[in-house]
Amino acid sequence: MSCAPVDDGPSRDEAMLLTWLERHDECCPVCRYRLQGIESARCPECGTDLRLTVDSSEARQGAWLFAMLAPALGMGFTSVVAAILLVAVTLERIQQGSAAIPWQPVVIFSTMLLLALIDLAVLMYLLSHRSNFMKRPVKARWKLASAWFIGVGLMHLAAGITLAVVL
């Protein structure tokens, strides 16, 4: 007598999902691949296991948005500080009738610009790796998002301390 498992075909849940996808043009929640007409409950593009549920995509976006928040805030803050500094130094130079700019504002402006560019690079990286991020379990997503948030904050703190020491 053989002890090999018997393949009874797709489960009831999988059959319902496949029936749904025969009639509806849905996309994979991770990679956005069009799933209409697939033959198993797995995305053929990214391999994500699929299931038919009543769910809210917004409810699962918290960690992703948190990861995006730190570089977005950092980029906005450093850009505003750099713009204010540029305007203030320019107006001061005009009032004094001098074309020479002291080195301190140049160092601060350059540091702010560099931080904004790094934040932009982090945002672009996160956007281009969204599907990898979303494939992770929820706890892992939150840990990764927290690490990004803390890392960006520490980068800005280190730049601020460096500027305070140098200037």
Image (cartoon, rainbow, N blue to C red):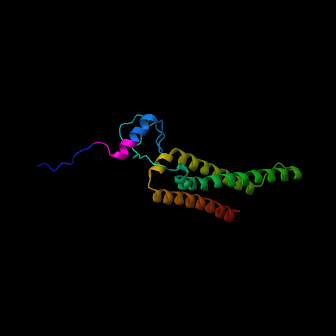
Look at the image and give the residue range highlighted in magenta. 9-16
Can residue 86 be seen at all in this image of the molecule? yes
- Residue 103 percent across, percent down from the top left: 74, 55
Residue at x-position 48% and y-position 56%: 141
Pick the front one: 97 or 66: 66
Residue 15 in the magenta stretch? The answer is yes
The secondary structure making up most of the magenta span is: helix
Residue at x-position 54% and y-position 53%: 59
- Residue 139 percent across, percent down from the top left: 46, 60
- Residue 109 percent across, percent down from the top left: 71, 53
Pick the front one: 74 or 134: 134
- Residue 7 percent across, percent down from the top left: 24, 44
In this rendering, position of residue 18 left or right of residue 26 = left
Pick the front one: 74 or 69: 69
Can residue 42 be seen at all in this image of the molecule? no
In this rendering, position of residue 144 left or right of residue 70 = left
Give the mark count. 0
Residue 159 in the magenta stretch? The answer is no
Residue at x-position 53% and y-position 49%: 57
Q: Determine the image quadrant of residue 19.
A: top left
Placement of 17 over or under 156, stated as above or below: above
